[in-house]
Image (tube, grey):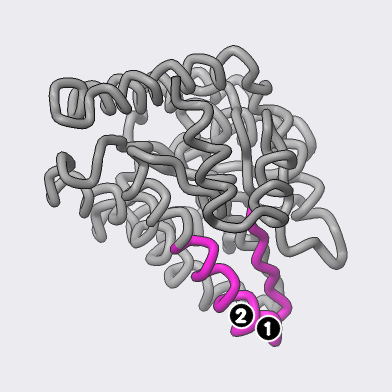
Amino acid sequence: MAKTVLVTGASSGIGKATAIYLAQNGYKVYGAARRVERLEALKDTGIKPIALDVSKEESLTACVDRIIKEAGSVDVLINNAGLGSYGALEDVPMAEAKNQLEINLFGAARLIQLVLPHMRKNRYGKIVNISSIGGKVSLPMGSWYHASKFAIEGLSDSLRNEVRQFGIDVIVIEPGGTRSEMIAVGSEDLMRVSGNSPYSKLANSIQKMYADIEKNAVDPVVIASLIKKGIEAKHPKVRYIGGAMAKPMLFMRKILSDKLFDKMVMSQMK
């Protein structure tokens, strides 16, 4: 029997590619997003569009309730919905910082809470949290984004050992540069917040770096295939890494001291 999958943030990027890829491979896929009009085209691939704003409790509960009513279970939850909001810590309004954490962390956590009772009952479940190499490596001007992704990493590590007794796996995906609208949107956001502040010189350097990342970014189906590999493994790895510069960056972070890593990162800010 086909497993039922909920993919959040399915209107673009990794979420869209993953929803399509899994639907093409026999899964019953619900593609969820706030911009539900952008999901209509996915119907042709057999995906069921569903409205979801991960920052609103009533939307989260309505989404899960509908899937349980129609499909009977959520076998695989892919927490992909995310926001990349950038700017110097001093410049970012706290309301924007809280919104970043609401979407990237608390929305994902609440969805996990909502699907876990059904997964426990079925003694089966796969929870896939889309982190980033930014959950292990921090760049300037991304303090709140990195805070949210570091938090997802920690949440996943704790959760994994809570739910394994119920036959539930927790998998973290750490993409590097991946083609999506997030890079361009994040770059625009950076300049809006810090482009005319005392941090403007660094902001311009970061913007140029993002442009280089975008040139080398991989197709999101690369990450979708990693997700499929993880959810189909009998004993999945804790983390799957893919995308431009992901493995080299994480390797350098592992072997270098904090100060040497900082020096390497800042040497790219020209």
Which residue is located at x 37 percent, y 37 percent?
84
Q: Which part of the image, by quadrant, shows the N terminus?
A: bottom right
Which residue is located at x 73 percent, y 78 percent?
167
Above or below, comparing residue 210 to residue 260 in the picture: above
Left or right, residue 94 beside residue 154? left
Circle 1 Cα neighbour tier, 10 Å, few/some/many (<14 / 14–19 / ≥20): some
Evaluate whether residue 47 shows in this view. Answer: yes
Q: Mark 1: which amino acid? A: Phe
Which residue is located at x 39 percent, y 21 percent?
205
Q: Say how many tags the image has.
A: 2
Q: Which part of the image, by quadrant, shows the C terminus?
A: top left
Left or right, residue 192 beside residue 82? left
Above or below, comparing residue 160 to residue 107 in the picture: below
Disc 1 secondary structure class: helix
Please state which of residues 171 and 111 is positioned toward the viewer in this rendering. Answer: 171
Q: Which mark is residue 120?
A: 2
Q: Position of residue 154 (x, y in %)?
A: 52, 69
Q: Mark 2: which amino acid? A: Arg
Left or right, residue 37 beside residue 254? left
In the rendered structure, which segment of residues is drawn in magenta? 151-173
Seen from this angle, which residue lies furthest right? 234
Above or below, comparing residue 256 to residue 265 in the picture: below
Evaluate if marks 1 and 2 touch, with contact meaning CB atoms under 8 Å apart. Answer: yes
Left or right, residue 250 beside residue 260? right
Q: Which mark is residue 166?
A: 1
Please state which of residues 68 and 33 is positioned toward the viewer in this rendering. Answer: 33
Please state which of residues 35 and 46 is positioned toward the viewer in this rendering. Answer: 35
